[in-house]
Image: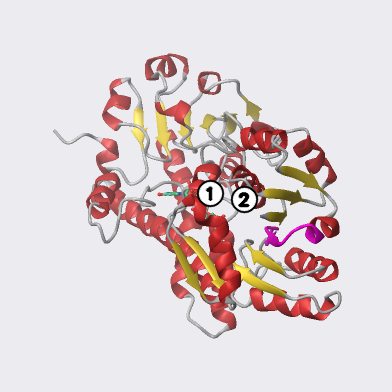
Amino acid sequence: MNICVIGTGYVGLVTGVVFADLGNDVICVDKDEKKIELLKAGKSPIYEPGVEELIERGIEEGRLVFSTDINESIKRSEVVFIAVGTPSLPSGESDLSQVEEVAKSIALSLNGYKIIVNKSTVPVGSGNNVRDLILKYRNGKNDFDVVSNPEFLREGQAVYDTLHPDRIVIGATNHSAALKIVELYAPLERPMLMTDLASAELIKYASNCFLALKISYINALSQLCESVNADIALVAKGMGADSRIGPSFLQAGLGYGGSCLPKDVAALIATSQRFGCDASMLKAVQVINTEQPKHFVDKIKKALGGLDGKTIAVLGLSFKPNTDDLREAKSIEIIRYLLSEKALVKAYDPAAMENFKRFHPTITYANSPYDAAQDADAVVLITEWNEFKQLNLDRLRSVVKQPYLFDGRNIYDPTRVRRSGFCYEGVGRAHNGEAIE
Ligand code: UGA
């Protein structure tokens, strides 16, 4: 199939390279010339395992091209994916200007029947708006259909998720358009759900907000665990063993970050309010998520008897492992709190340090976790990169000034850490992480 994907962010780029790998002819379009030049040279503008290999292979085999010419790319394609950004406006609503701009370009480039597939995360009703815009601006009487096909990939494992989605949602008003998209996804052999447009659009928000709700639920419980000497990891394990609940997204920590969950919770609150529906539950999800980092820093401050002049080694800056993405990363606000209390920060991250300099240019950047911990009053883990999971704790202990380890993602075994001579504090862990004899 001849496809074009407009927007080469995480969703657009990964969708494009995977479709090319499945044997389609794909044009990935972006108005950012630098990005397109990089992609043409076989380089990925995003840090995402496996993407660069697929780019190289697609180019080599002649099925994948990159272009800034949106009109020509649309003309050459039978299926056009919209995968541009929909950032939050100050009101919490989504800024749809990029989607609308693309819809107008599609209208002006229609040279035959095309299926317009919306992959950007857009509020309910946006598919209809895209259709209305194309009808308003279209070139001649060429026909088209609009399909909603939300994306569920996670950053850091975007290629895997695109190849192995739990479900593929296809929302359409025209059955034959939906079937064409079913055909496109058929090689993946994954469950597909065909719906109307509005339901497909809502499935995306409902899913992301439910994940955020699970995280805030477990984080709220983690605070209770600290008060009643229970262990949130055991509580989550016990809950997750119930197949109706499931174990995933019950990892207590510093809260959710990234470009999706915070934005989508805000957008669903805005949509609910626009339609006069109650949004109080989602607002509580937001409040808990905002409080979690502050609560964590307060614990560090209390344990160290104040932060003024203390050196804090921060391990992990990206909003989650395997990405250099810092959007809504908890590290940004935690370091802001630490600096406002006059602490000195030495940070290390395997991928995100260059990007982080934009937020906090004056902190010290280290070459390794041990370098960060040198003479530190506390080691604070913010992002659970694999390379932090098997740290040599004896070596770490030998370089720090004071042996405090604050584990913001509960990745360490408290007993093992304590055996190495550290005072350990996780999030919501009983008896300050004391093992039960
Ligand atoms: C999220 C969804 O998981 C994807 O399904 C969706 O496609 C994507 O948004 C999107 O809308 O594009 P992503 O933002 O890449 O994916 O990251 P997640 O893996 O969901 O993690 C989000 C945040 O939640 C991270 O900060 C992570 O540390 C945190 N988290 C996750 C927890 O604090 N606890 C958990 O148990 C799980």
Left/right placement of residue 189 relative to residue 225 reads right
Return the residue found at the far bottom: 276
Q: Residue at x 74, y 70 (%)?
A: 113
Which percent across, then down, holds residue 376? 51, 24
Q: Is there any visible trace of residue 23 in the rendered image?
A: yes
Question: Front-most of 273 and 435?
Answer: 273
Going by the numbered disc 2, the residue's amino acid type is Thr
**Quadrant that contains the N terminus:** bottom right
Give the answer, above or below, for where 396 lies relative to 142.
Answer: above
Which percent across, then down, holds residue 137? 84, 77
Q: Residue at x 17, y 36 (%)?
A: 436
Question: Front-most of 278 and 46?
Answer: 46
Disc 2 and disc 1 in contact, CB within 8 angstroms: yes
Q: Report the Cα–Cα distance between label 2 and label 1.
A: 7 Å
Q: Residue at x 46, y 19 (%)?
A: 400
Residue to which mark 1 is pinned = 162
Give the answer, above or below, for where 144 lies relative to 422.
Answer: below
Going by the numbered disc 1, the residue's amino acid type is Thr
Q: Specify start and end residues of the magenta stretch as a single range.
A: 74-86
Which quarter of the figure has residue 173? bottom right
Which quarter of the figure has residue 138? bottom right
Taking the magenta stretch, the answer to whether it contains residue 350 is no
Q: Which mark is residue 180?
A: none
Q: Secondary structure at mark 1?
A: helix
Q: Secondary structure at mark 2?
A: helix
Residue to which mark 2 is pinned = 15
Left/right placement of residue 75 relative to residue 429 reads right
